[in-house]
Amino acid sequence: MNNALKFFATLILALSSAALPAAAQLKIGTVDVNRVFNSMPKTESAKVQLRLAEEAAEKEFKERMDAYKTAVEQARKLEQEANSPALSENARAERRRNLAAKAGDVRKLELEINEFRQTRMKELQEQLLKNRKEILDQITAVAVEISKAEGFDLVIDKSGPSAAGIPVVLFGKDAIDFTDKVIAQIEKSGMQTLEKDESAGKKK
């Protein structure tokens, strides 16, 4: 049994030693995706677009709420008049009919406001996620392009914490950070796109 244990221990040690050179040859890179994300003009543009959409939604919501409050106040006035002894029975009957119609308007406005709020919140959330995905897809594409061109075997995003709440990269002696290259490449692509758009505009 002792011989068998010695054999396996020797085998494990040999395998570990053989694996070290291969691991040492790995070219590892890191990218601070969050820094790239925040540095992009497209990110700021997306924030502005989202803020404008939020402001427009808030304005429309306020207008709907004002209309609702007005309808509620009108319903209250009709209710008071419908019960007023100062009015004739015919006049009170007319107020009751108007009150029933106005109460229907109030309920309709309530439903429309709730539906509007839910729909707009969903649309704004979808817009936020869509914009974020487009930007992250561009960052990923550029990072992959640079990784392939420079022969990286593994690239790690070092910007966010892990599930345990600690940084993904605690230490990387031989890891190469090429965040600045990703930012530069994205800026270069943006300038090329702008030049193409300006050129196309001049031809028209």
Image (spheres, grey):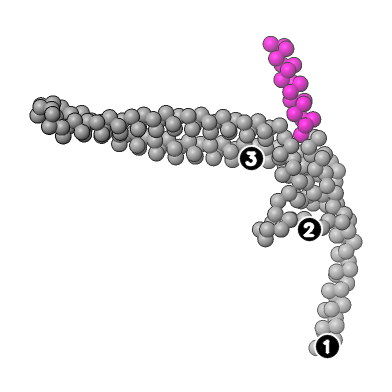
Residue range (magenta): 186-204
Q: Looking at the rendering, in which quadrant would you find the N terminus?
A: bottom right
Left/right placement of residue 174 relative to residue 88 reads right
Residue 186: % across, % down: 76, 34
Q: Which residue is mark 2?
A: 170
Q: Compared with residue 154, is residue 200 higher up or lower down, i.e. above or below?
A: above
Q: CA distance from mark 1 to mark 2?
A: 39 Å
In this picture, residue 20 sits left or right of residue 96: right
| Local crowd size for mark 2, using a 10 Å CA cut-off: few (<14), some (14–19), many (≥20) | few
Question: How far is disc 1 from disc 3 in space, using C-alphas?
Answer: 58 Å
The circle on residue 70 is: none
Taking depth in this image into account, of 177 and 95 the one nearest to the observer is 95
Q: Which residue is more in the foreground, 177 or 24? A: 177
The CA distance from mark 3 to mark 2 is 27 Å
Which residue shows up at 62% across the image and 31% down it? 48
Residue of label 1? 2
Secondary structure of the residue carrying numbered label 1 = helix
